[in-house]
Image: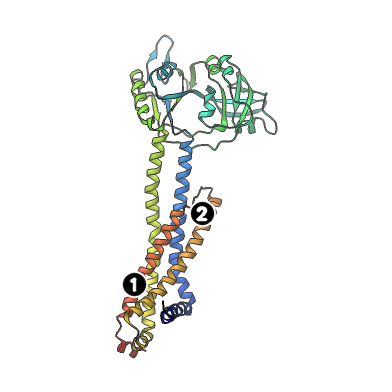
Amino acid sequence: MSRRSWLHWGGMFSTALRSVLMHKLRSFLTILGLVFGVASVIVMLAVAEGASQTAQRQIASLGINNIIVRTVKPAVDGPINFRSFIQEYGLKYDDLRRIKETLDTVVRITPLREFVHEARYEDKTLDSRLVGVDPSYFEVNRLQLARGRFLEPSDLETQSNVCVIGDEVAQKIYPGQSAIDKSIQVNNEHFFRIVGVMMYRTPSAGIGSSLAAQDLNKDIVIPLTTDRSRIGEVLSKRQQGSFSRQRLELSQITIEVADRYQVKATANALDGLLAKYHPNKDYVITVPLDLIEQAQATQRIFNFVLGATAAISLLVGGIGIMNIMLASVSERTREIGIRRALGARQSDIVLQFLIETAFLSSVGTLIGLGVGVLSPPLVSYFSGMTTIVSPWSLIIASAVSLFVGIASGIYPARQAAKLDPIEALRHS
């Protein structure tokens, strides 16, 4: 580039900067629309991304390769044994055996049985969930120990009266002391010796239509064989003058499949197998892999809606720039006439105003990026929501802001270039 060209471009940039800085307050108010537009796009997408990632982590904690089958009470009451007046429904040990014998893709099966009971130690009580499991339960649910040990195969074989308790049980029933080797009473009749305390686990919200919200910190986990022998399979309930007895063998069966690409096919085969023996549909199958795919699809829609909503403020900011630049053309009509009379071409006038517009858009975008990056941590601090600023949200917000800003300056620039030099010189 020749020295003359450098001087030409340098003059244009200095003139543009001088024009913008001549009205500092007006220029600042002009770019506020872009500042808030860029910041709102980044913040809203950060909130959406944080919510989506939180939901996906909760689902992923169930295991991508897992299939979860839970007992549900059927809409139509199941068969009643009129000799004992016991209603039977739900998953059974025979189902567990059939799954093991039939489905070749299964590498691990974890049965579970749960009931809500009151836990007590001395004068401290807490409503807890008594969970009967086998040792694989802890690995399947990715649970970690704070103290002590997990249940072992020998505990199942001997039907030991031992348990592993959740963090909240330890904190509220045994405050300020170690719970290891102490006893805990459940339902005012059963005592278990504590051999382990689990680390705190963030409670999960309800996932899908079949998994209710769970707080594993309130769990008292015992061997499944101990649960079967001591608690029994028949539950008796007395409320509001009525008395009912229900037989429930298993509350849940978690099935781990060898390959994630076989999960859906295995779930279909499992549904067909269980349907033969459960005509009342007293079970529901949840596939975490399906839930994650649904969450990702929902996130894409959510991001589009939030991004489009926030982008409206960018459009408003662009209209603000166009309005100010049109006013600037009117104010500088005589200046434009002088420049045209001295030999400036229409393209030079257009370029002059576009440089000013680009300068305003760039400054507004940069400030908006700064505000947008600093705001999500404040949102997390005051609201407790998880926010994640993704690089692509910064790129999209910046690109749209610059495009809207510069595009808004094209019409005023063309209007300025079309002015008749003689009429412009007469303008006062």
Q: Residue at x 43, y 58 (%)?
A: 395
Identify the residue position indicated by label 1 in the image: 410
Provide residue 93's location: percent of width, then percent of height.
44, 17
98 sits left or right of 180 in the view: left
The amino acid pointed to by label 1 is Ile
Helix, strand, or loop for circle 1? helix
Location of residue 97 with respect to 44 vertically, above or below: above
Kindly tell me whether residue 134 is visible in this rendering: yes
Helix, strand, or loop for circle 2? helix
Location of residue 1 with respect to 286 vertically, above or below: below
Q: Residue at x 56, y 36 (%)?
A: 201
Identify the residue position indicated by label 2 in the image: 376
Number of numbered discs present?
2
Provide residue 426's location: percent of width, then percent of height.
33, 90
- Bin the neighbour count of mark 2 within 10 Å (Cα to Cα): few under 14, some 14-19, many 20 and up: many
Provide residue 121's location: percent of width, then percent of height.
65, 25
Q: Quadrant of the C terminus?
A: bottom left
261 sits left or right of 177 in the view: left
